[in-house]
Amino acid sequence: MELEALLHKEELTKEEIAALLGLTDKKERQRLYDAAYAVKLKYIGNVDHYRGLLEFSNRCIKNCRYCGIRRGNEAVERFDTSREDILAMARWAYEQHYGSLTLQSGERQDPEFIAFVEEILREIKEIGGGALGITLCVGEQTEETYRRWFEAGAHRYLLRIETSNPALYARLHPQDGHHEWTVRRDCLLTLKKIGYQVGTGDMIGLPGQTLEDLAADILFYKKLKIDMIGMGPYVVHHQTPIGRAVMAEGGDSPAAREHRFILGLNMIAVTRLCLKNVNIASTTALQALNPFGREFGLKAGANILMPIVTLPRYRKQYLLYDNKPCVGDSPDQCRNCLEARVHSIGDRIGWDEWGDSPRYFTDHRLSAEKPGIAEEQEQ
Ligand code: SAH
Ligand code: SF4
């Protein structure tokens, strides 16, 4: 089918999605990004929203084979941000008119951690009389924990499925019974059941990942009626098993990084074409591969930015991947730099607004507890 027809087709098949994701020609890619930006204008407008990203601890019980703060990386100095510092940064974000905060950390499931997060949520909710929207991104938890945090004030949750292909997922994680694709998928279903706005996403350009895998990821988001997408290119971390293997095979060359960057933009654009009224983040990982990565992401259909508000003294210790940008910056610098970037592409910032996913209010509930695609993928 002609590119123009594909860009305006109502329901794309998996093969058609894969064909769009595989575009490499510069002019064709520009047509894809323009079409996606037009869909963003129609369903969202030329407005982008901020979620101040507070990476409050790098302690993690998991050992994901791609991640720089995995439990097994002994070169990492572990940190916890104090309650006072978290609240001070939340108040700072509120005073900067950010509208929303994302609390992210490594995964912990112990009672102290659960209670700590619950208390922090209640206290952040007191700032400005509940002015800040809160997204949590702290991994897999029980239904009871998710409920406690929802009741304490978190209303969005981000848990990337990483890949919708269980076999690829198994290669990226240790086979120790604690890194199960089905458990992660079920967490997403639980979060939806509780009433969170649910975000998921993948890493793009993983070793062994095909265009069909990425197309299946988009169909997975669609089947699960996901409200928010947070995805980004895979970026090598040199102290990880996957990072070392990729480097040994020459997979971290400038050309390979450029390829992953383009795939990342294509994924944003095609996801916007397919899902229309969801929130899509233009993530920091894009900028790790290209200095203007996040602006390109907004122009390809993304509408969410996550300026880092992590305390400067901890930023060097929260490196999920190499060359993470903004590590030497202060929150003030991140605010001004991002504002200039948004204006440079003709968008504006929705200051003081939560910027919820429009999708959540129109089509959130799943008809059955476990949608067909998840069952199919288990077989
Ligand atoms: N521990 C939580 C949240 C922090 S990790 C969790 O895992 O859900 C947040 C995200 O960082 C992960 O979902 C993963 O997609 C991403 N990430 C980790 N290592 C990465 C890498 N090397 N390149 C790109 N993204 C990475
Ligand atoms: Fe921990 Fe998340 Fe990194 Fe996995 S991706 S090791 S759960 S911080």
Image: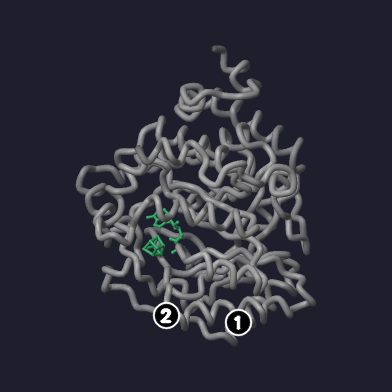
Pointer 1: residues within 10 angstroms few (<14), some, or many (20+)? some
| The C terminus, quarter of image | top left
Q: In this view of the protein, can residue 146 be seen by the observer?
A: yes
Q: In this view of the protein, can residue 296 be seen by the observer?
A: no
Q: Which residue is mark 1?
A: 119
Residue at the image position 63 percent from the left and 20 percent from the top: 9
Q: Nearer the viewer, residue 78 or 277?
A: 277
Q: CA distance from mark 1 to mark 2?
A: 19 Å
Question: x%, y% of residue 374?
Answer: 45, 41
Question: x%, y% of residue 178?
Answer: 32, 62
CB contact under 8 Å: marks 1 and 2: no
Q: Which residue is mark 2?
A: 79
Q: Nearer the viewer, residue 42 or 122?
A: 122
| The N terminus, quarter of image | top right
Q: Nearer the viewer, residue 59 or 286?
A: 59
**Label 1 sits on what residue type?**
Glu
The image shows residue 16, relative to residue 191, as above or below, that is above
Residue at the image position 49 percent from the left and 36 percent from the top: 372
At mark 2, the secondary structure is loop
Quadrant of the rendered image containing residue 158: bottom right
